Amino acid sequence: MPGALLAALLLVTAAPAAAAEAAVATDIPAGQAKTIRIRSLPVGAAVGVRISSSGRVLVSFLGMKHLKAPSTGAKPLFRGVVQEKMSFRVVIPEADDYVLILSNRSGKEAVKVEAEIQAVRRRPNPPPKGYSPRPEKASWSPR
């Protein structure tokens, strides 16, 4: 993707409560957009984004699959406009690389943007109260 800003590389590992953070500061010239790619987000990860800007910027957060092959009715996980400050949180529906697009395509002058991104892989839910595995699966000790 020409002109893409690959400034943030977040890898969320397979650990139960892994987290990754990145911060990006950039200028977006009038009539252009910048893209921040976030790699290898697992299903169920919570991604929080905080953005501050010196002007009006269109913000979109979507999966690479939707960016490379848009389908009818497909929508970004988040889309909004930031004038000064904004924050949002999404939960990742499928494992993929994701992108945060910051667009100043309709702007008349350059805009300074700072973005903070945090991704946290959530712990699995504990088993329900009273749950007990089958006896043959409950122990690893030899008989």
Image (cartoon, rainbow, N blue to C red):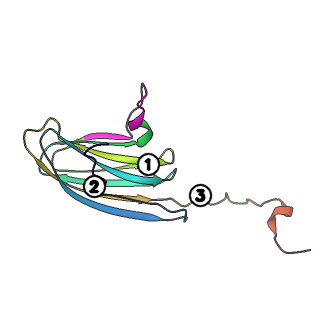
Residue 50 spot, x, y in % from top left: 27, 55
Residue 66 spot, x, y in % from top left: 42, 36
Q: Amino acid at mark 2?
A: Arg
* Residue sitting farthest toward the top: 72
Q: Secondary structure at mark 1?
A: strand
Residue 79 spot, x, y in % from top left: 31, 39
Task: Pick the residue in front: 83 or 125.
Answer: 83
Residue 57 spot, x, y in % from top left: 19, 43
| Residue bearing mark 1 | 97
Numbered range of the magenta stretch: 67-80
Q: Amino acid at mark 3?
A: Asn
Dot 1 surroundings within 10 Å: few (below 14), some, or many (20 or more)?
some
Relative horizontal placement of residue 139, taking residue 88 as reference (left or right) = right
| Residue bearing mark 3 | 125
| Residue 50 marker | 2
Query: Label 2 vs label 3: CA separation?
Result: 27 Å
Query: Label 3 vs label 1: CA separation?
Result: 24 Å
Question: Quick one: label 2 or label 1, which is nearer the N terminus?
Answer: 2
* Residue sitting farthest toward the bottom: 142
Quadrant of the image for the C terminus? bottom right
